[in-house]
Image: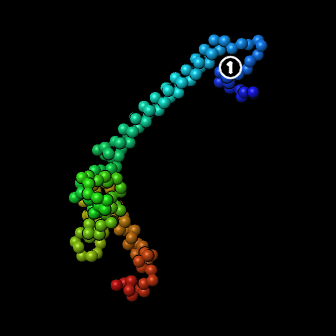
Amino acid sequence: LSLQESIYSKALLAPLVHRSPKCSINASVWLSAIALLILNMMLQITVLMKVQVLTESKESDVQAKLFGADGLCRRRLPDELLFIPSFGALDKYYDCGPLTPLLLSNTNVLDVNHDGMWQRQEASEVAQEWSKKYQKGAQLPRTFDKWMAKARTGSMVSQQNLTEKKWEQ
């Protein structure tokens, strides 16, 4: 039986496996093997305990970043939501997403004066109002500008296959 060269094979396995007429297995060989195993076990337990401490400290950091006073996620009551929840009635909902897509999903919120047209001034007003209310940033004026630029060039999907006369209506 050939052993690979390592500290474990030299100190632990070699005395137990190789029997020679000169060397008889005695109590000192067994005690040194057991001592080495105990030392190994203590080192591994020390490493595992350190990993646990680091994990627990990071968990509190993550919780603070998500749910703390300045965290990304907020608990909202059902009447504070901009949408109708489709997953059942709950006492509180977690809002962790960006505000802009949430606002864009509800056209009643965007069209402040309810004239059926969304203006840049309305985008600014809605962004300021809901940013303050939700304590998140909203990029509605920028979104409005990008969409208007696409509309002016006729590159929106809804404008495809339209004649120029229908597009101007």
Query: Which residue in the structure is indicated by mark 1?
Result: 16
Q: Position of residue 159 (x, y in %)?
A: 42, 79
Q: Nearer the viewer, residue 94 or 131?
A: 94
Q: In the rendered view, does 113 fall on the left or right side of 59? A: left
Residue drawn at point x = 58 percent, y = 17 percent? 35
Q: Using the image, determine if residue 67 lies above or below residue 54.
A: below
Residue 76 seen in this snapshot:
no
Q: Using the image, determine if residue 148 lies above or below residue 61.
A: below
Q: Using the image, determine if residue 22 lies above or below residue 134.
A: above
Q: In the rendered view, does 130 fall on the left or right side of 154? A: left
Q: Position of residue 121 (x, y in %)?
A: 27, 68
- At label 1, which amino acid type do we have? Leu
Residue drawn at point x = 27 percent, y = 76 percent? 116
Q: Position of residue 29 (x, y in %)?
A: 65, 14
Q: Nearer the viewer, residue 96 or 10?
A: 10
Question: Around disc 1, counting alpha carbons within 10 Å, would you say few (fewer than 14), some (14 to 19), or many (20 or more)?
Answer: some
Residue drawn at point x = 31 percent, y = 52 percent? 94
